[in-house]
Image (cartoon, rainbow, N blue to C red):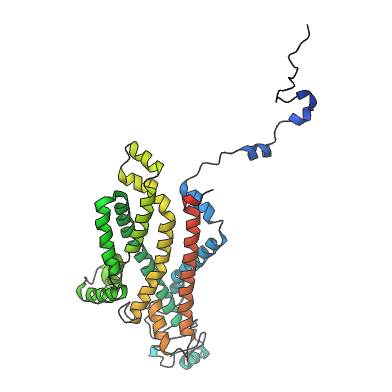
């Protein structure tokens, strides 16, 4: 009896193994196995976002710029022997000739001291009109401006995120009332309210001489209060709008159906999908806070002398712009680098951490 076990039906789609050599069915190599491996390695949301962030050259460049600025403002005061409020002197004698010196130049008294065998640290950015080292003042001004910018953005982020999350998630009458409060604050003229609040708070706020707030000064504390009262409304509106469109998605409804609490739903499911808005708004809030502080320093109600800020240095340099233009160039360059790097970093963080942009 003929064995028909290995015969192939003409209409069958099964391969005819007799037409293929044994080499055609060789075992797959390790490289071919890796190509067929569709399962990615186990990772977290943060690690995956950081991996994508460091693949973005502009974001890496911005991180390098910010790290360089932070390194300079931390290390420079430890190396340069001058203080930001120190009026230059030689052997205990005030050096009146060290006024408005150009970068890397010495006064006549300093040059005589060097010729007699003494050592003098160079004035990298020259000196100002009150015979103070300008490089140290720019370094401390960058410290103050960055501190104000970061701290103010954190205040705005916390208040705006909490307010917008509650308003958008609860909806209904709660959302209506909360958004009307936001509209009232939006209708107020920003700069006028900032000036009025700053003036009033400077008169009202009194701190103990031993407290940390006293070291910051009433002007800086009033700046933080002003940002906390006025600048959070934009963040709240953006987050509320995002949550209104996200909270009806299937995964949010699934979380509700299994009994997840509203706080966990907002924290675990809704806010991660608002990261692009949160990151960009926070990154842009820092230069906005720096510009606001510069404006307040310009009108005389910002950071008080002798403590410098980038805004107060730019304002002081305006008077001698034709004779000493470099005094305006140095703080302006620092402001531009800070703003540019923060904007690039914000874009990179959005591209890396936004779940909607994941492939």
Q: Can residue 131 be seen in this view?
A: no
Q: Which residue is drawn at 39% across and 85% down?
A: 316
The residue depicted at 42 percent of the width and 86 percent of the height is 318
Estimate the x, y position of residue 140 in percent, counting from the top left: 40, 75
Q: Residue 40: where, in percent of width, then height?
A: 55, 41
Which residue in the rendered view is the most extreme toward the front?
Answer: 11
Foreground residue among 159 and 63: 159
Seen in the picture, residue 233 relative to 144 is either above or below; the reply is above
Where residue 216 appears, x then y in whole percent?
A: 30, 71
Q: Classify the position of the N terminus by image quarter.
A: top right
Q: Is residue 96 visible?
A: yes
Q: Where is residue 291 in the image (x, y as percent from the top left)?
A: 39, 74
Relative to 118, is 250 above or below? above
Image height of 24 relative to 294, above or below: above
In-front residue for pair 246/42: 246
Horizontal arrangement in the rendering, residue 106 relative to residue 258 (left or right): right
* Direction top: furthest residue: 1
**Image check: 95 left or right of 155?**
right
Residue nearest the viewer, comparing 238 with 324: 238
Which residue is at a point 75% across and 17% down the rendered structure image? 7
128 shown above or below 48: below
Q: What is the count of numbered marks?
A: 0
Q: Which residue is drawn at 34% across and 59% down?
A: 237
């Amino acid at each position: 009896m003929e064995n028909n076990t290995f015969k192939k039906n003409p209409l069958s789609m099964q391969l005819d193994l007799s037409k293929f050599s044994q080499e055609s069915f060789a075992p797959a190599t390790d490289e071919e196995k890796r190509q067929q491996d569709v399962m990615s390695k186990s990772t977290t949301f943060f690690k995956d976002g950081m991996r994508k962030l460091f693949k973005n050259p502009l974001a890496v460049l911005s991180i390098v710029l910010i790290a360089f600025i932070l390194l300079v403002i931390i290390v420079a005061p430890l190396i340069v022997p001058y203080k930001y409020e120190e009026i230059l002197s030689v052997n205990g004698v005030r050096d009146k000739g060290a006024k408005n010196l150009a970068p890397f130049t010495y006064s006549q008294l300093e040059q005589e001291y060097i010729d007699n065998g003494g050592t003098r640290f160079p004035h990298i950015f020259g000196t100002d009109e009150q015979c103070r080292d300008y490089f140290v003042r720019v370094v401390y001004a960058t410290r103050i401006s960055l501190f104000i910018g970061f701290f103010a953005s954190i205040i705005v982020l916390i208040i705006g995120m909490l307010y917008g999350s509650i308003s958008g998630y609860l909806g209904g009458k709660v959302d209506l009332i909360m958004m009307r409060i936001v509209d009232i604050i939006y209708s107020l003229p920003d700069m006028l309210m900032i000036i009025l609040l700053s003036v009033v708070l400077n008169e009202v706020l009194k701190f103990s001489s031993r407290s940390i707030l006293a070291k910051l000064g009433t002007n800086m504390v009033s700046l933080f209060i002003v940002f906390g009262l006025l600048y959070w409304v934009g963040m709240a509106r953006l987050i509320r709008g995002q949550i209104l469109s996200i909270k009806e998605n299937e995964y949010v409804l699934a979380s509700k159906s299994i009994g997840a609490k509203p706080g966990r739903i907002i924290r675990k499911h809704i806010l991660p999908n608002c990261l692009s808005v949160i990151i960009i708004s926070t990154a842009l809030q820092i230069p906005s806070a720096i510009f606001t502080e510069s404006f307040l320093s310009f009108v005389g109600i910002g950071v008080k002398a002798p403590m410098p800020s980038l805004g107060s240095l730019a304002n002081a340099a305006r008077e001698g712009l034709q004779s000493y233009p470099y005094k305006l160039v140095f703080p302006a360059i620092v402001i531009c680098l800070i703003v540019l790097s923060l904007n690039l970093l914000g874009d990179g963080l959005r591209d890396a951490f936004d779940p909607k942009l994941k492939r």
